[in-house]
Amino acid sequence: MSEEASTTAEGGARRIRVLIVDDHALVRAGVRAELATHAPDIDVVGEADDVEGAVAAAHALRPDVVLLDVHLPGGHGGGGAEVVAACADLLAGTRFLALSVSDASEDVVAVIRAGARGYVTKAISAQELAEAVRRVAAGDAAFSPRLAGFVLDAFGTAAADVAVHDDELDRLTAREREVMRLIARGYTYKEVAAELFISIKTVETHVSAVLRKLQLSSRHELTRWAAARRLL
């Protein structure tokens, strides 16, 4: 995350600066309150309620993460995807995470294609939202598990001609392949642990091994790697 954009918390830990974009004041207030209660390392530095306001606020505040709804008034009717596209010059330091009631594939794919790093629904808990913000701020992808498939299908179709390299897959053990598929779909470590009946520590170990063996640096890269090979 941007060093200039982040403040330093007590003890030297980096704080994450977030801009909330939603056209409902009650939703913005609720998200702000939940993050204040459950995520002391996250600061809400501003709010916006339409496309133009979001673009202006993102450029003025340069937050680490813009948390935005996909359906917003204003602009040319493109909603959250339009906001992300209009902030392409900020993507090196500001990451975008969609937060919406919509779980429609077209909404998910549109905002990710525009440059967002993740998409979660408003059904998630405050703790899950905070973790998604942290992951996106760190440069990783964050998806509600069932939504990741839309992105994988969309990017996988575009890369249908990419062959599966057996030598790359052969580097992974059977368990590492299982963990890789779930992580690439957006599952959290806790969800992977529950799905495979292993400990969270074991999941972390497998993920580190997968990234090392495939010479990847983040979950975001792993998702694209797996999608391109039609592994999910």
Image (cartoon, rainbow, N blue to C red):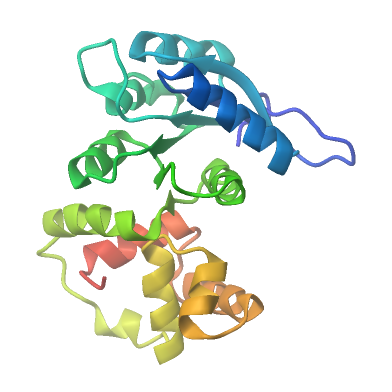
Q: Is residue 42 left or right of residue 119?
A: right
* Rendering coords of residue 162 (x, y %): 16, 66
Q: Is residue 26 left or right of residue 37?
A: left
Residue 68 drawn above or below residue 135: above
Q: Quadrant of residue 19?
A: top right
Observer-nearest of 172 and 108: 108
Query: What residue do we see at 34% from left, 14% from top?
Result: 51
Residue furthest out toward the front: 26
Examine the rendering and report whether any part of residue 16 can be seen: no
Observer-nearest of 165 and 225: 225
Quarter of the image with the N terminus in it: top right
Residue 107 drawn above or below residue 28: below
Examine the rendering and report whether any part of residue 109 can be seen: yes
Query: What residue do we see at 58% from left, 15% from top?
Result: 61
Query: What residue do we see at 64% from left, 25% from top?
Result: 44
* Rendering coords of residue 212 (x, y %): 52, 72
* Rendering coords of residue 79 (x, y %): 28, 23
Residue 74 drawn above or below residue 197: above
Observer-nearest of 177 and 54: 54
Quarter of the image with the C terminus in it: bottom left
Tell me how many marks there are. Answer: 0
